[in-house]
């Protein structure tokens, strides 16, 4: 991922990859945030057939989203139907 990508437009996964390869020292205008507020949701992980997961991963890539987000969206739609 190049330096030109706006950090505000990155997904959490892209940001993680980006900062794995870069350092704050490379950017003079980056300031450390001292106060962060967030809330965590409990998650339950379930097993998915590997072939099915491969198809989900491919569809998520096509839709430019994460597998987790796509699976949650689909399950929510199905649960609310």
Image (cartoon, rainbow, N blue to C red):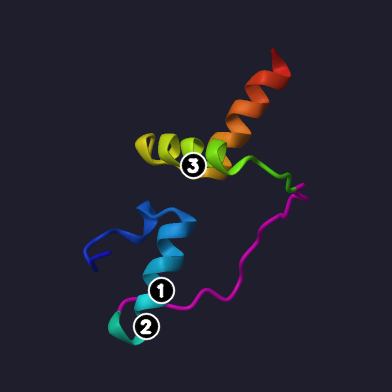
Part of the protein shown in magenta: 29-44
- Measuring 77% from the left and 47% from the top, which residue is drawn there? 44
- Residue 67 left/right relative to 9: right
What kind of element bears circle 3? helix
- Measuring 46% from the left and 58% from the top, which residue is drawn there? 13
Q: Position of residue 30 (x, y in %)?
A: 37, 76
Vertically, is 7 above or below 72? below
Quarter of the image for residue 38 reads bottom right
What kind of element bears circle 2? loop
- Measuring 30% from the left and 58% from the top, which residue is drawn there? 6
Q: What quarter of the picture does the C terminus occupy? A: top right
| Residue 55 image label | none
- Residue 80 left/right relative to 15: right
SS majority, magenta: loop
Residue at which label 3 appears: 54
Residue closest to the eye, 53 or 33: 53
Residue 40 covered by magenta stretch? yes
Q: Nearer the viewer, mark 3 or mark 2?
A: 3
Q: Nearer the viewer, mark 3 or mark 1?
A: 3
What kind of element bears circle 1? helix
Instruction: Kindly report the distance in space between the C-alpha atoms of the residues bearing marks 3 and 2.
Output: 33 Å
């Amino acid at each position: 991922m190049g330096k030109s990508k706006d950090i505000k437009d990155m997904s959490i996964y892209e940001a993680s990859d980006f900062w794995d390869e870069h350092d704050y020292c490379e950017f003079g205008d980056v300031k450390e945030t001292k106060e962060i507020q967030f809330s965590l949701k409990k998650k339950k992980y379930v097993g998915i057939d590997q072939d099915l997961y491969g198809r989900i991963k491919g569809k998520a890539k096509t839709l430019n989203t994460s597998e987790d987000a796509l699976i949650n969206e689909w399950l929510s739609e199905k649960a609310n139907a």
